């Protein structure tokens, strides 16, 4: 008989589907840092428990069932209560909200650039412009770091965001421009998942 799966891993997989929505095993692994074998194994067990479902044979995406969504919310609430760090997470969320409008402005600046005074779809042929916007993303990342440090001290699973932001910024600077806003693994997507994570962790609605 195989040993039971680590409860932290189960929480991470459930919570990834809560924050990222329906997705495949590769993306769940990227979100959680859990290896592909363990992700697949957890999904099979969670599926058997009626907490997740595979969307179709042709689309190997997994999503939470209603029972899974309720279970994810309960596990996250218990995690926060056990850590007794609600006030710290709530304070970090307030600091995140101050930064959030800047992220939206930067995404707009990445997708549109002024040409002769008119905003035009950014075709990324102006390398100087792109470097400038990437520098602004990096600056936002630096200013978000203290927020993530507080969150990670409160709940260690938040530490994964630092790794993910550093990875996509490095990729974008190396020329993989889709990692800014145009990929499910982009800076913008990770930021949105962080926002959703904070809401879910605190039991808040948008």
Image (cartoon, helix red, strand yellow):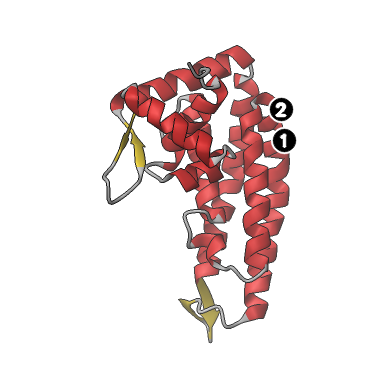
Query: Which residue corresponds to the image point at 68% horizontal and 60% vertical from the top-left?
Result: 170
The picture places residue 150, in percent across and down from the top left corner, at: 70, 31
Left or right, residue 78 beside residue 126: left
Which one is in front, 157 or 62? 62
In the displayed structure, 112 sits above or below 77; it is below
Query: Which residue corresponds to the image point at 61% horizontal and 27% vertical from the top-left?
Result: 89
The picture places residue 50, in percent across and down from the top left corner, at: 31, 24
The picture places residue 62, in percent across and down from the top left corner, at: 36, 40
In the displayed structure, 64 sits above or below 180; it is above
How many numbered marks, from 0 up?
2
Looking at this rendering, what residue extends furthest in the bottom direction?
A: 116
Label number found at residue 149 = 1
Which residue, given by chain and number where applicable, does mark 2 sit on?
153
Kindly indicate the quadrant of the structure image that contains residue 157: top right
Which one is in front, 73 or 85? 73
Answer yes or no: do the residues labelled 1 and 2 have beta carbons within 8 Å? yes
* Mark 2 crowdedness (10 Å alpha carbons): few <14, some 14-19, many ≥20: some
Looking at this rendering, what residue extends furthest in the front direction?
A: 1
In the displayed structure, 29 sits above or below 128; it is above
- Mark 2, secondary structure of its residue: helix
Query: Which residue corresponds to the image point at 71% horizontal and 56% vertical from the top-left?
Result: 139
- Mark 1, secondary structure of its residue: helix
Kindly indicate the quadrant of the structure image that contains residue 90: top right
The picture places residue 206, in percent across and down from the top left corner, at: 41, 36
Q: Measure the alpha-carbon separation of dots 1 and 2.
A: 6 Å
Kindly indicate the quadrant of the structure image that contains residue 9: top right
Query: Which residue corresponds to the image point at 28% horizontal and 51% vertical from the top-left?
Result: 58
* Mark 1 crowdedness (10 Å alpha carbons): few <14, some 14-19, many ≥20: some
In the displayed structure, 137 sits above or below 153; it is below
Label number found at residue 7 = none
Which one is in front, 133 or 52? 52
């Amino acid at each position: 008989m195989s040993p039971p799966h680590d409860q932290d891993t189960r929480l991470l997989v459930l919570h990834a589907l809560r924050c990222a929505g329906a997705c495949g095993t590769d993306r769940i692994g990227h979100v959680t840092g859990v290896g592909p074998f363990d992700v697949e194994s957890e999904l099979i067990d969670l599926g058997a428990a009626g907490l997740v479902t595979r969307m179709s044979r042709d689309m190997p995406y997994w999503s939470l069932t209603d029972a899974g969504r309720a279970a994810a919310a309960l596990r996250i609430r218990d995690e926060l209560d056990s850590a007794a760090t609600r006030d710290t997470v709530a304070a970090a969320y307030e600091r995140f909200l101050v930064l959030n409008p800047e992220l939206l402005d930067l995404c707009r600046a990445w997708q549109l650039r002024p040409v002769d005074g008119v905003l035009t779809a950014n075709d990324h042929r102006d390398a100087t412009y792109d470097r400038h916007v990437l520098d602004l993303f990096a600056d936002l990342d630096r200013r978000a770091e203290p927020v993530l440090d507080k969150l990670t001290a409160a709940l260690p699973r938040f530490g994964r965001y630092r790794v993910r932001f550093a990875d996509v910024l490095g990729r974008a600077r190396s020329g993989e421009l889709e990692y800014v806003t145009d990929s499910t693994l982009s800076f913008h997507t990770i930021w949105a998942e962080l926002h959703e994570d904070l809401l879910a962790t605190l039991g808040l609605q948008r």
